[in-house]
Image (cartoon, rainbow, N blue to C red):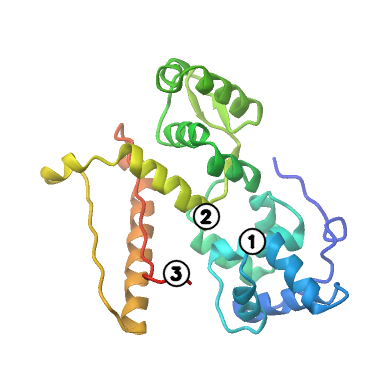
Amino acid sequence: MVTVVSSDDLNVSNLQVSTMDLKSQVSLDLKQKLKEFRTSQIGMRIMSDSMGIHSKTLRRLIKGENRPGYQTLYKIYRYLFATQNDCLLIELVPPVVASELKKRDPQSYFQGHQLSGDVEAELRYDRCFAEIYFLAGTGEISKELIQFRFGQHGLETLNRMLERKVLRVNERGFLVLGENLASFGPETIKRVGLHLSEKYLSPENSDENGKNFMALYAEGLSPEAYSKWIDIDEKAFNQKVAISRGAQHKGDVRAFTFLLTDTLSEN
C-alpha cells in the first residue's frame, strides 16, 4: 500500500508542474531549490553531496545543457521530495519526469511494491544480501538453500530481509521477493554487477555455443559513433527485459545480464 503525502508535508511546494520538456523541467526545479540557500555556492555543494551527483554535472543540468537519465532523475527528485520510496516519488514528480521514469526504468512496472533507496544501500554494501535478493528475484528459494550457500550469516541476513519485507514466504512455503524492492542507481549497478560477474560468470561455458555470452572490444570513436553504441546497448537491454516479462518465457534458468559501455577516460 502506498501512503499519499502532500507536497506541503514534503516541503516541495516550490516545484512547478508544467508541460515543458524534461531538460527545462529539471533545470527549473533545481533552480528553485537553489534559491533556498544563502548563496548559490553553498547550495551547489550541499545539493551535489546530498544527491550524489558531481557538481559539474549538476551545473550542466541547471543550465539545461544535459538531458538526465532516469537514474539521475531519481537522485534529484528523491532529494527534492525527501523520500526514498520511488513508487511514491513517481506519483509526486512533474508529469514529464514521471513519464520518463516509467518509460526508462525497467522496474517501474512493479505494482503494489515500494522501490526503496534504503534497500538499494543494503544491496550495494552487503554481498550476501545482494545475492539472496537476486536469487529470490529469479525464482523461489528455500531457507535450506540460503543456509547451504551462505551459512549462519545467510540466515541472519534472511531474517533481516524478512523483517524489512524485502522477502516474503509464498503460499508454497518458499521465499520470494516481498513488497519492499530496491532501486538501482549506477553505483549499485556497477558494484552488484561486478560481484555477480566475478562469482557466477563462467569463462568455460563460452566454449559451447548458447551457454553464455562474453565480449570485449575497444576502439577510438567519433562522438556520433559512441552515441550509437550507447543506443544499441540500451535497446538490447530493453529487449531482454521485455522478453523476461512474458509469461511464456518464465523458467528455471536463473540468468543475469550486466551490460555496459563507457570511455577509457578517468574523468
Could you tell me if the residues under marks 1 and 2 are in contact, i.e. CB atoms within 8 Å? yes
Q: Position of residue 159 (x, y in %)?
A: 60, 22
Q: Residue 12: where, in percent of width, then height?
A: 82, 64
According to the picture, the residue beneath numbered tag 2 turns out to be 187
- According to the image, label 3 marks what residue? 266
Residue 200 placement (x, y as % from top left): 32, 38
**Identity, as a three-letter code, of the amino acid under mark 2:** Glu
Do callouts 3 and 2 mark residues in contact (Cβ within 8 Å)?
no
Q: Are marks 1 and 3 in contact (CB under 8 Å)?
A: no
* For residue 262, side relative to residue 22 (left or right): left
User: Is the residue 117 above or below the residue 162 in the image?
Assistant: below
Q: Amino acid at mark 1?
A: Gly
Residue 167 in sight in this render: yes
Left/right of residue 239 with respect to residue 89 in the rendered view: left
Q: Which mark is residue 52?
A: 1
Q: CA distance from mark 1 to mark 3?
A: 18 Å
